[in-house]
Image (tube, grey):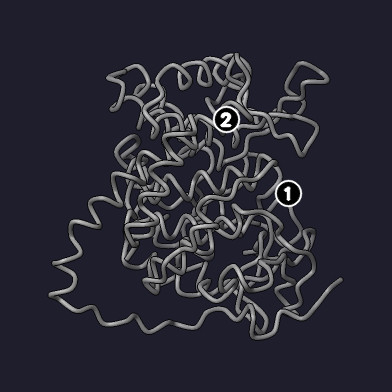
Amino acid sequence: MIVKGRLTGLIVAACLQASPIHAGTETQAWVTPQRPLADEASSRSDQGDREANARVARMWFKAEWQIYASTFVTQDGRVVDNANGNVSHSEGQGYGLLLAALAGDSDRFDKIWRWTETHMMVRPDHLLSWRWDPQKGAITDTNNATDGDILVAWALAQAAQKFNRPDYRVTAAVIAGAIGANLIKNGDHGLILLPAAQGFSRDDQPDGPVVNLSYWVFPAFSTLKDLAPAYDWEALHANGLKLLNVGRFGPLRLPPDWLSLGGQTPAPAQKFPSQFGYNAIRIPLYLAWDSAPQARHALSGFVNLWRGPRSAGPYVIDVNSGSAEQILDGAGYRLALALARCVSLDSPIDEQVIKSRDPLYYPDTLRMLSLAAIQERLPQCF
């Protein structure tokens, strides 16, 4: 439980702010933790503190959103990936829309959406083209990215409710239906979600289909079910968790960023690095954000990847050998894994991890998503 000193400090802060090594035991994973027993009387007495945590978490998230938006969102609503040539992609626009909606920022939401609709909603199938390059002033890859489509649909549905904009919900339903029609496929390993309309099917990959389990944005699935009920989102959600259980490898039992489903059993995809890396690091964040008990069970496999501010890592890890290949150097990666530990173990998140920001788009976006999950569903972690 957070002490008054930390609450006071965060309130004041929020008001003032508008070489390869073997991962070893340091990164052991997939060990089901024993949850500490709670004292019932103590839990009742802490109710007031939990409510205070929730209020401060909401205020902190909104203040941090303003800083994030002023850093990564242009005046016309383009979310900038400053580590990749300042490009914009559907994932980034989706994250920006979602964060703006959860922060209650209708003006920025509208700007981000107008830019996204104008520049990325150019495919005839109602999916978004995924990459826009400022050097070209145009889309440079018309293929979609399914996680971006999911994020945009989820965000539009959130904004429709928060801002009383039924037109947003209509568009969200169109995109969700397009995801269902084009990207949900039934195969030998059950219902799957293709990462894009082109490039990952059995015809496109020698060991296809190939999936990316971080594209299963688990907390969005209940919304997608409401938006496009003709598709079996519950089965897709359940099969994603099943694939996460069987698609883990090596001494640390970790899932790779890219998973082949072309054989009798899942395997790391042949044409991609066999790594738990920049994609898969999102999986524990989405699992922590999800409220399904099965997601919480799957989350336990990630709690020992990074053990706190005095521990090394987190790392990009070769899933076959368990070796750490490079550090995931950013506060957002640490916060996402600290959130997993909080949800699975009732382990408090270090204040410095909560307060640290990142200068680069991707880790700072994961930091903001973790703060969003905390203020929306997990205030006990603040």
Residue drawn at point x = 75 percent, y = 63 percent: 327
Q: Dot 2 corresponds to which residue?
A: 93
Q: Is residue 323 left or right of residue 258?
A: right
Q: Is residue 92 above or below residue 236?
A: above
The N terminus - image quarter: bottom left
- Find residue 165 and report its image quarter: top left
Q: Which mark is residue 204?
A: 1
Amino acid type indicated by mark 2: Gln
Q: Secondary structure at mark 1?
A: loop
Observer-side mark, 1 or 2, equals 2
Residue sitting nearer the eye, 155 or 173: 155
Residue 246: x percent and y percent? Answer: 53, 74
Residue 35: x percent and y percent? Answer: 34, 80
Q: Is residue 49 left or right of residue 323?
A: left
Amino acid type indicated by mark 1: Asp
Q: Earlier in the sequence, mark 1 or mark 2?
A: 2
Q: Is residue 314 left or right of residue 113?
A: right
Q: Residues within 10 Å of mark 1 (few under 14, many from 20)?
A: few
